[in-house]
Image (cartoon, rainbow, N blue to C red):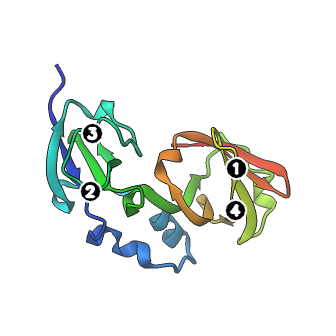
């Protein structure tokens, strides 16, 4: 039997999103902060319901949340497996559903030779598995990470898919973003 968990709504006006207003990205720390999946807590929002287990949910999910009384649909914006909590936000434009920076940690299992020939702020294109369009972006490299800064906000539910980074119609890197 699965243990009941809590569903917590995070309001779009929550102070947790105040750091998103900063557009100054110049250091590896700035980019890393902008790319991090948010870590929500019970105290960041409002308890709105319960669920039968976090494993029944995925980021970006809209159906099956079973919390009513909202003007717009709720979407899963975070999952805390340890505390068995699911965090939701109201509406497709909720800031918890969106990011503008993707971080790729450098490690020995990935061949970076092609992509590391680029200079910072080089325009690239991001193609996502299951999508039939590309997203304009910019490449940045630092000591421990490669970052892709997108021209527009990117839905977090497109993570957990393969992406490819293209430069002048050449694939530079195929990678899975968890």
- What whole-number distance in Å separates the C-alpha atoms at marks 2 and 4? 33 Å
- What whole-number distance in Å separates the C-alpha atoms at marks 2 and 1? 31 Å
Q: Counting other residues with Cα less than 10 Å from the Cα at mark 2, is it few (<14), some (14-19), or many (20 or more)?
A: few
Q: Earlier in the sequence, mark 2 or mark 4?
A: 2
Dot 4 and dot 3 residues touching (CB under 8 Å): no
Q: Which of marks 2 and 1 is nearer the N terminus?
A: 2
Q: Which of marks 2 and 3 is nearer the N terminus?
A: 3
Dot 1 and dot 4 residues touching (CB under 8 Å): no
Residue at image mark 4:
136
- What whole-number distance in Å separates the C-alpha atoms at marks 4 and 3? 33 Å
x and y percentages locating residue 103 in the rendered image: 56, 57
Q: Which mark is residue 65?
A: 3
Query: Who's the residue at 15% across and 44% down the image?
Result: 49
Q: Considering only vertical position in the picture, is 31 above or below 105?
A: below
Q: Which of marks 4 and 3 is nearer the N terminus?
A: 3
Q: Counting other residues with Cα less than 10 Å from the Cα at mark 1, is it few (<14), some (14-19), or many (20 or more)?
A: few
- Depth check: 162 or 46 in front? 46
Element on which disc 4 rests: strand
Q: Which mark is residue 71?
A: 2
Element on which disc 1 rests: loop
x and y percentages locating residue 66 in the rendered image: 23, 38
Q: Which mark is residue 133?
A: 1
Dot 2 and dot 3 residues touching (CB under 8 Å): no
- What whole-number distance in Å separates the C-alpha atoms at marks 1 and 4? 10 Å
x and y percentages locating residue 165 in the rendered image: 72, 52
């Amino acid at each position: 039997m699965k243990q009941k968990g809590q569903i917590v709504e995070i309001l779009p006006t929550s102070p947790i999103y105040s750091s998103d207003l900063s557009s100054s990205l110049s250091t590896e720390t700035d980019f890393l902060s902008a790319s991090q999946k948010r870590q929500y807590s019970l105290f960041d929002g409002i308890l709105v319901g319960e669920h039968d287990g976090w494993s029944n949910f995925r980021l970006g999910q809209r159906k099956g949340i079973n919390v009513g009384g909202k003007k717009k649909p709720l979407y899963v914006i975070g999952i805390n497996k340890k505390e068995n909590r699911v965090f939701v936000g109201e509406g497709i434009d909720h800031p918890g559903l969106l990011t503008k920076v993707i971080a790729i940690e450098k490690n020995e299992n990935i061949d970076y030779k092609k992509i590391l020939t680029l200079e910072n702020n080089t325009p690239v294109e991001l193609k996502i598995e299951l999508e039939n369009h590309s997203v304009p972006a910019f490449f940045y490299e630092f000591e421990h990470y490669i970052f892709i800064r997108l021209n527009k906000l990117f839905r977090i539910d497109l993570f957990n898919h393969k992406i490819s980074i293209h430069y002048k119609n050449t694939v530079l890197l195929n990678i899975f973003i968890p």
